Image (tube, rainbow, N blue to C red):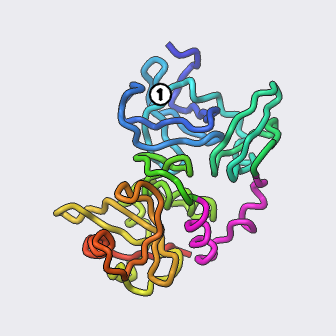
């Protein structure tokens, strides 16, 4: 049994660089998403050392107590990793992904991290700034179902994490992101604005299964299994995969102000 005393009022903080969110209370279960170091979660249920938790985006899943520590209430003030290596008070070094939160006791040895109050100036809500981050921060990332970092990311994880850096909260899944944004048109090859979200479906019922971010000039960045990871597409070209994407487009949406 877990050494933590559990109640549904409890909050926990992710202590590892990444903690998996799983569909079931077992380590071999399917990955549904990931939590990053320093994120605070609410307890929903518990089965021994396995906890069902809910993140700030209301997304739920199972994770092991070994990934967590009790919340101390200061996590919202911690620095934001831009991809760095730190050393803690015990001399332990650790690599942190983009978006993780760093406790004050961690000294940055390599890479970069910013104070919370610097986030708005480093990552403004301007749509071009969002598009620039989308085009650069996940370059080279492999596709990983449930992933949310440049170490491996899926389509909606890319969108959610880029927007979060710019202070724009979005739900976790692509269909939820569509519901949280405003449709503007349905042509994937149109001259859509930077920062617009393009939604797609490969299902007969047209339920949304994929999302990308417009870079302007008819370009889109997305994380796609067919591409092996993050790629930039020229949406008006004749390449067969892009033509298929255009046919699967369910709409182009705009992020609220």
**On screen, residue 2 above or below 139:** above
Residue 26, visible in the rendered structure: yes
**Is there any visible trace of residue 250 in the rendered image?**
no
The residue positioned farthest toward the bottom in the image shown: 191
Looking at this view, is 190 or 74 the one in front? Answer: 190
Above or below for 75 versus 118 = above
In the picture, measured across the screen, residue 150 lies left or right of residue 199, that is right
Q: Residue at x 30, y 62 (%)?
A: 208
Q: Secondary structure at mark 1?
A: strand
Compared across the picture, whether 99 is left or right of 198 comes to: right
Of all residues shown, which one is farthest toward the left? 204
Residue pictured at 36% horizontal, 36% vertical: 30
- Position in image of residue 50 (x %, y %): 46, 24
Residue depicted at x 71% and y 39% = 73
Q: Position of residue 120 (x, y in %)?
A: 72, 66
Q: Quadrant of residue 227?
A: bottom left
Rendered view: 78 above or below 223? above
Question: Is-magenta flag for residue 133?
Answer: yes
Residue 38 location (% of width, % of height): 66, 40
* Circle 1 crowding by C-alpha within 10 Å: few under 14, some 14–19, many from 20: many
Above or below residue 96? Residue 208 is: below
Q: Position of residue 246 (x, y in %)?
A: 30, 75
- Of 235 and 149, the residue lying toward us: 235
Residue range (magenta): 112-137
Q: Main secondary structure of the magenta part?
A: helix
The quarter of the image holding the C terminus is bottom right
Residue located at (79% from left, 34% from top): 87
Residue closer to the observer: 156 or 221: 221
Q: Which residue is mark 1?
A: 51
């Amino acid at each position: 049994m877990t050494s933590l005393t559990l109640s549904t009022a409890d909050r926990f903080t992710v202590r590892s660089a990444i903690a998996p969110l799983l569909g079931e209370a077992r380590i071999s279960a399917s990955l549904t998403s990931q939590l990053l170091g320093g994120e605070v979660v609410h307890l929903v249920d518990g089965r021994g050392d396995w906890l069902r938790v809910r993140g700030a985006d209301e997304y739920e899943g199972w994770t092991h107590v070994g990934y967590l520590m009790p919340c101390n209430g200061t996590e919202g003030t911690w620095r934001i990793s831009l991809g760095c290596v730190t050393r803690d008070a015990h001399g332990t070094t650790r690599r942190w992904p983009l978006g993780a939160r760093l406790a004050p006791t961690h000294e940055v040895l390599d890479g970069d991290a910013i104070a919370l109050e610097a986030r708005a100036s480093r990552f403004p809500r301007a749509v071009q700034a969002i598009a620039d981050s989308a085009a650069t921060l996940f370059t080279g990332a492999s596709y990983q179902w449930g992933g949310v970092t440049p170490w491996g990311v899926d389509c909606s994880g890319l969108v959610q994490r880029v927007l979060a850096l710019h202070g724009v909260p979005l739900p976790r899944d692509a269909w939820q992101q569509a519901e949280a944004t405003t449709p503007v048109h349905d042509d994937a090859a149109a001259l859509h604005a930077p920062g617009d979200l393009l939604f797609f479906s490969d299902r007969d019922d047209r339920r949304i299964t994929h999302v990308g971010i417009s870079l302007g000039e008819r370009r889109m960045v997305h994380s796609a299994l067919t591409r092996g990871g993050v790629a930039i597409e020229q949406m008006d070209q004749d390449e067969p995969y892009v033509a298929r994407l255009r046919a699967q487009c369910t709409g182009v949406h705009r992020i609220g102000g």
